[in-house]
Structures are given as C-alpha cells and as structure tokens.
Image (spheres, rainbow, N blue to C red):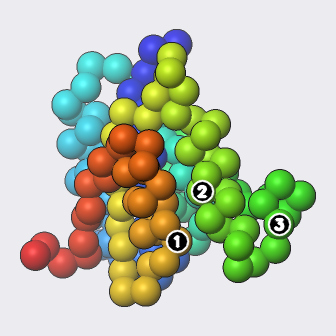
C-alpha cells in the first residue's frame, strides 16, 4: 500500500492539555491536508507526545505503528531508548516505504527526543521541531 509515513518523537513531559494536544494536532492535520495519501504514524510508544500523537492520529483515521522498548531487543535502561530509536528507524525507513516526514516535540531535557532527531538527520530525514510555545 502506498502511504505517507510520519514519525513522531517527543518529550515524555509534553502536556496532555489543550495547548499540547493542539500543537500536535496542527502538525498532523497539516500533513494530512498536504498529501493525498493515507497516513501512517510511527512512534516510540512513550508517555507524553508519542501517545498523544498516536491517539490523535487514530481519531483522524491513520494507521498507527508503536515501537515500545523491548527489553529482549533493546536491553535495560538507560540505553534501551536509543536502541529502540534505531530499531524503529531501521524497521520503518525502507527504500520502498520510507519515512516521509518527522516531527519532534521537545521539552527541556528531552534527551531521547534529541537522540532520535540526530538519528533521523544521519538517515537524511529532517525533523520539523515543534515547540510548545511558538518562538
């Protein structure tokens, strides 16, 4: 199936309130309006921005692909998050079905978010950074 694949990464502290949900909803709606294809959301299944985005994407009719940390594959904390990030990126960024867009929703001290932003950059994918407050 041809689709538009969007990866979301974000802070576990991203607020689940009108402002926080609104910033994520706006990004997803913009994507959906800009492409004429079904959309797929890929995320790390962490609390905060990842799960908020997943819920909103489901409401919009998107397919949602979560990648939770798997201790058997990713090991124990603190290194499990970066390993999961790379596993998710490797699994989803395929030549015949690449990641088409990425959004990052960071809060202060969002180390995992910035780790994935760096990994996306190495893979040639530019993440659009969305701050809670407009700069």
**Are the residues flagged by discs 2 and 1 in contact, CB closer than 8 Å?**
yes
The mark that comes first in sequence, 2 or 3, is 3
Give percent across and percent down for residue 84. Answer: 67, 57
The residue depicted at 48 percent of the width and 60 percent of the height is: 116
From the viewer's perspective, tell me whether residue 131 is left or right of residue 103.
left
Q: Residue 112: which numbered mark, if any?
A: 1
- SS label for mark 1: helix
Q: Residue 75: which numbered mark, if any?
A: 3
Q: How busy is the neighbourhood of tag 3: few (under 14 within 10 Å), some, or many (20 plus)? A: some
The residue depicted at 50 percent of the width and 21 percent of the height is: 95
Q: CA distance from mark 2 to mark 3?
A: 12 Å
- SS label for mark 2: helix
Q: How many marks?
A: 3
Give percent across and percent down for residue 66. Answer: 63, 49
Q: Is residue 134 above or below residue 23?
A: below
Q: Is residue 31 above or below residue 103?
A: above
Q: Quadrant of residue 32?
A: top left
**Are the residues flagged by discs 2 and 3 in contact, CB closer than 8 Å?**
no
Q: CA distance from mark 2 to mark 1?
A: 8 Å
Q: How busy is the neighbourhood of tag 1: few (under 14 within 10 Å), some, or many (20 plus)? A: some
Q: From the image, tell me which residue sits under label 2.
A: 85
């Amino acid at each position: 199936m041809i689709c538009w694949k969007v990866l979301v990464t974000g802070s576990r502290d991203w607020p689940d309130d009108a402002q926080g949900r609104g910033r994520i909803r706006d990004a997803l709606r913009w994507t959906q309006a800009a492409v004429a294809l079904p959309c797929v959301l890929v995320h790390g299944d962490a609390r905060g921005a990842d799960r908020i985005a997943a819920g909103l994407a489901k409401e919009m009719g998107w397919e949602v692909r979560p990648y939770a940390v798997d201790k058997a594959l990713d090991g124990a904390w603190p290194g499990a998050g970066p390993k999961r990030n790379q596993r998710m990126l490797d699994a989803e960024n395929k030549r015949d079905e690449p990641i088409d867009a990425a959004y990052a929703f960071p809060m202060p001290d969002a180390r995992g978010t910035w780790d994935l932003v760096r990994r996306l950059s190495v893979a040639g994918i530019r993440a659009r950074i969305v701050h809670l407050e407009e700069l």
